[in-house]
Image: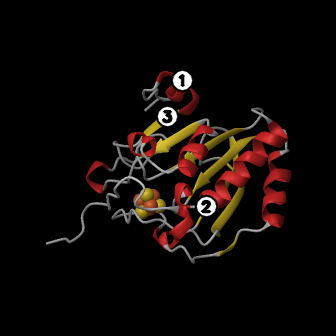
Amino acid sequence: MIKNELPNNPKPKEWLADDLSQQYIADYKPFNFVDGEGVRNSLYVSGCRFACPGCYNKIAQNFHYGHPYTKELEDQIIADLAQSYVQGLTLLGGEPFLNTQVCLALVKRVRQEFGHDKDIWSWTGYTWDELQQESADKKELLSLLDILVDGRFIQAKKDLTLQFRGSSNQRIIDVPASLATNKVVIWKDLVH
Ligand code: SF4
């Protein structure tokens, strides 16, 4: 029998970035075409507690994996975003919402420097509904995003044909529209 076939399910506010984040970065991939729409700069933060079986980046579940986030890296990300052909920033992991110290500082700076000329996507293992019951830092990060890809990776629902998602429970959510209407609004450009 296979053990632990499902990811962990935290209670609201059970996992807090203040307790868990080491502010470590697993990777930074500028100018890629796979982490959302258009050309994007992707930051992979370290640490995730969901422990989804089949996780695409298991090594980055460790909060100590990689290297510390630095002001130099942040400056590089901003400089890379300034390229006219770059559409935006993507946050992945690990779990961005358990590394809000890093992610909030970065998205605030992106808004400060570029307004809404650059868009911001984030992946998360939390569902939209779970985030509504979460800590203030998570809600603030959510409020600054354009697109959220939500939910754990569920192996039984794995589908390699899906746009930007690994399993069919995950959704590509238009964050401003969802916050404005208080219900999940799916990204208008979703094809499959
Ligand atoms: S939420 Fe994402 S990073 Fe975390 S264990 Fe699941 S697939 Fe991996």
Contact between marks 1 and 3 (CB within 8 A): the answer is no
Q: Characterize the local packing of mark 3: few (<14), some (14-19) or many (20 or more) Cα atoms within 10 angstroms.
A: many
Residue occupying the point 78% across, 48% down: 109
Which residue is the site of mark 2?
44
Q: Position of residue 155 (x, y in %)?
A: 30, 56
Which residue is the site of mark 3?
173
Residue occupying the point 77% across, 45% down: 110
Q: Nearer the viewer, mark 1 or mark 3?
A: 1
Separation of disc 1 and disc 2 at Cα?
Answer: 28 Å
Secondary element type, mark 2: strand
Q: Characterize the local packing of mark 1: few (<14), some (14-19) or many (20 or more) Cα atoms within 10 angstroms.
A: few
Q: Is residue 59 left or right of residue 153?
A: right
Q: Position of residue 80 (x, y in %)?
A: 82, 51
Q: Quadrant of the C terminus?
A: top left
The answer, for residue 182, to whether it is visible in the render is: yes
Q: Position of residue 177 (x, y in %)?
A: 54, 25
Which numbered disc flags the more N-terminal residue, 1 or 2? Answer: 2
Q: Is residue 174 left or right of residue 106?
A: left
Which residue is the site of mark 1?
180
Q: Is residue 177 left or right of residue 33?
A: left
183 versus 114 height, above or below: above
52 versus 106 height, above or below: below
Which numbered disc flags the more N-terminal residue, 3 or 2? Answer: 2
Residue occupying the point 57% across, 78% down: 64
Contact between marks 3 and 2 (CB within 8 A): the answer is no
Closer to the camera in the image, 92 or 20 = 20
Secondary element type, mark 1: helix
Q: Quadrant of residue 88?
A: top right
Residue 5 shows which numbered tag?
none
Which numbered disc flags the more N-terminal residue, 1 or 3? Answer: 3
Ligand 1 picture quarter? bottom left
Separation of disc 3 and disc 2 at Cα?
Answer: 20 Å
